[in-house]
Image: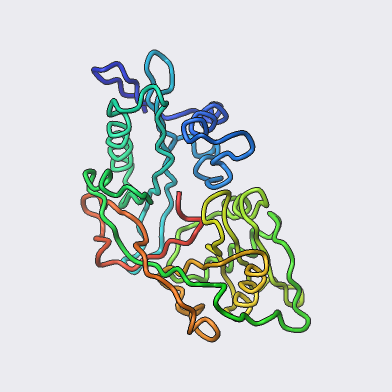
Amino acid sequence: MTVASAHEVAWTTARPEENGDFVAFVDACFGRPGGRSLRREFPTALAADNARHHFEGSIDGRRVCAATALVRPWTTTSGRIVVACVGCFATAPSYRGQGLSGRLQGVVLEHLEREGVDWAALWTDRPEIYARRGFRPTGVEVHGRLDAVDWPRPADGDVVRAATRDDASAALELYRAHRMRADRTTADMAAYLDPTTSRSWVLVRGDEIVAYVCLGKGDDFPGYVHDYGGEPGAVHALWGVAVDAGARAVLLPAGSDAYRRGPAAAMPGTVQSAAMIRAFDGAPRPASTDFAVWGFDSA
């Protein structure tokens, strides 16, 4: 996709072989030093195989702004909905204040609508910027005080160990048991369980992984258990392991009711907006749809 504007900005999507340069540009715009790349927070959104959703604007062949989208089908109470989680909006310092980010937002949304995406979703601390593009706060999630509860210890015979990429298939099956979720592939889950992305643990009972939890992702979700799955009692035991490792909170999206029972029933928490969403024409309305955003599903 290539479009040239009257102001000599070429709007393109990156090629896979440009991935290193694309990510380095985004990192530089966000002031990320070496070793703390945004790829740690968003390993699938910034991966080379997602290049067709790496958007950029160039002037005289020089990249001046960029953004990403991670497109996945989601299972919701309105059926299967294709959602693009957009983010990593970046503009080179010398080109800020010229409206490039706003123009890029329009390019991204037009591209996604043509592609057949139903919703665009994002997370921001400046909602007024995106409200002009039709984004509205939608849905709620609970942020529980994980460190305010005395969690059960693993049962005799249970084994807790650090998760690895090799646990991706087992963890994915546990994630898929959530009644509301985004579609993930085994490769997605392997990237998420990579120790450079998140501190993760699994609980093994016999020869079977029955629960997993993930604490933080890069510098995103600091101190939060944000992604988990499996038998609730085993998950609660892993929450205790995470607290011992410094966790203080847990993300409880819609559909996580099973994990709010037992010792979690009295856990204090706060209610927050889940995301800002723009629904394209013909798509189900977010206000009438229950959906869940687990930690790795954001971008």
Task: Check the picture and name the quadrant holding the N terminus.
Answer: top left
Q: How is the image coloured?
A: rainbow
Q: Is residue 9 above or below residue 281?
A: above
User: Which residue is located at x 30 percent, y 40 percent?
Assistant: 109
Q: Is residue 220 above or below residue 205?
A: above
Q: Position of residue 130 (x, y in %)?
A: 27, 45
Please identify the residue farthest to the bottom as the structure is shown.
262
Residue 294 is left or right of residue 96, and the answer is: right
Q: How many marks?
A: 0
Residue in front for this viewpoint, 113 or 22: 22
User: Which residue is located at x 63 percent, y 64 percent?
Assistant: 246
Residue in front for this viewpoint, 298 or 146: 146
Residue in front for this viewpoint, 299 or 47: 299
Residue 166 is left or right of residue 10, and the answer is: right
User: Which residue is located at x 67 percent, y 64 percent?
Assistant: 245
Q: Position of residue 131 (x, y in %)?
A: 24, 48
Please identify the residue farthest to the top as the structure is shown.
60
Residue 9 is left or right of residue 240, and the answer is: left
Q: Position of residue 265 (x, y in %)?
A: 48, 84
Q: Is residue 24 above or below residue 297?
A: above
Q: Position of residue 75 (x, y in %)?
A: 40, 63
